[in-house]
Image (spheres, grey):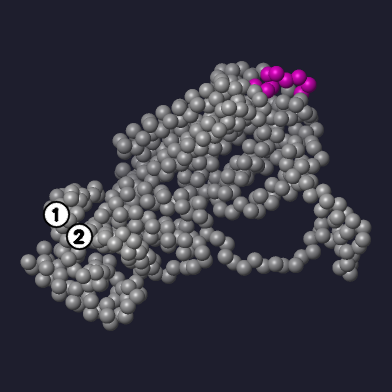
Amino acid sequence: MEKEFLEAYEAHADAIFRYCLVRVYERERARDLVQDVFVKAWNYIRSGHSVEKWKPFLFRIATNLIIDGARKKKEIVSLDIMQESGFDFGKDDRKHIDNWLDGQKAIDALGKLEDAYRDAVYMRYVEDLSPKEIAAISGVSENLISVRIHRGLYKLKKLLKR
Amino acid sequence: MNMQNFFNRLKTEKLATDERTKIRANLAQYLEDHPVRNTGRPRHVWQRSKIFSLFLTSKGKIPMPALIIALMITISGGLSTAANSTLPGDLLHPIKVNINERVKAILASGTENEADLALELMNERLSETELLVQNSDLKTEVVAQVEARFDEQAAKLRALIEKAQAEGKTEVAAKLSANLNAMLQVHDQVIAQLREKLAGVDPTNIENVQAKIKAEIKNADDISVRIETKVKADESNATSTPPIVKPRVVEEAARAKLAAVQSKIDEAARFIENKKSSVSAEAAARAEAKLAEARALVIQGQAKLEAGAFGEAFVLFQKAHVTAQSAKLQLEVSKRLKIEINDDKDEVRRGNSK
């Protein structure tokens, strides 16, 4: 059980981190969230449950934790404000400043979408989750997710053309 | 940036290596502290045990004499408690080993809990031996019992280390072998010192016990070396064949070891602080000096870690672990036996050669 869990960590930690980073903009918080997600996942397992599909399961936990965190803090600081206040995208394995700037632009653009569109587009095109899986994570119908993906993509294209 | 590049760029956003390692180490620790609960419904199978059958007739009724015996046992509820302080050769010692300790073993689940208990029981066996030596009670008829119990516990520990290694829990195996090594060395040293002042005990009896302890020290050393060699080998594989073995594995092992040794040092420091008022100033100072030695080893290990020499860092952390554990154990034995432990290796050797 432990082995399977740690393999799931190895396989999905980056994806969960990326998702949290896109949602909270803050590397340190995203990192803490990754740990919280896996702790919650382990608690779920140790209470006798089993996990069939790890990725949607972990995304569901991450989504709930982010929503809970946002409710508690009542503050989702915009990327612009954070950058103005000296927000550091953090140290990572990136070697080139071009990539770093592209990364900022990408997250910035995605951050300008409304939450519902952003999540749907992100999970579909960055994390390759199916509309059905996204629907399960978000707690809405598959049809609604398909609409959000379509509209979100349209809005994103417009943003990137500016 | 077109859409494809846009999504591809987002996909490259990852945790940094040290972030990933740290979270993994935290999770591994959490898993060990919070093992999977046994959620299966307990099956209460009615079986008539041999002991219980003493109280039953063939018709399943409890005869009056048996009820009286049962009542006596109930009244003498302190029997198992009384057995806890017994030594080999005492009437109640088999109750301590065969009942009290087996109950503990049944309750311990998970490799690490089992390992902690096995270490605790090994410490108990060695402490019993020291008391027998100190009280000049290590008689020939008791030695066989002492040796058999020691062998049994040593075999359990070896099996647990192998199990941890087989499960890929290198850190648990390393911690267990380090703690065992430190424990055996301290007790070996204490028995050597006690032996110098002995009267009334056949030296051969002590020599036999000492030989067994020394053989296990060598065995624990060999295991530690094997674990360290494996970590170093993983490191060299990682640098020579990056696509196959990730350097992260070795780095994780070193970082996990660092976390474990820091926790051990904190534990030893707290122990020394709590006990130093009840031991001599010399004993407390010796323990603190040993702890400082462990801290210095950690600093050296951290420098290696920063330099990327993860294998060497692991070895230094392992040494620091043994040293911190020794500091704690020496103080504990000093307090229990009311003796000053001479940490001079030459003295120990001189004691052994006599």
Amino acid beneath label 1: Leu
Residue B85 visible in the picture: yes
> Magenta residues?
B193-202
Residue B24: x %, y % from top left:
39, 51
Which residue was labeled with disc 2? Answer: A78
Q: Quadrant location of residue B131?
A: top right
The residue at the point 37 percent across, 51 percent down is: B23
Residue corresponding to mark 1: A101
Q: Residue at x 62, y 68 (%)?
A: B41
Give, as a three-letter code, the residue at label 2: Ser
On screen, residue A17 above or below B150: below
Position of B43 relative to B171 (above/below)? below
Question: For mark 2, does the 10 Å Cα neighbourhood hold few (<14), some (14 to 19), or many (20 or more) residues?
Answer: few
The residue located at (65%, 50%) in the rendering is B105
Numbered disc 2: secondary structure: loop
The image shows residue A25 at horizontal and vertical percentages of 24, 58
Image x and y of residue B36, in percent: 52, 59
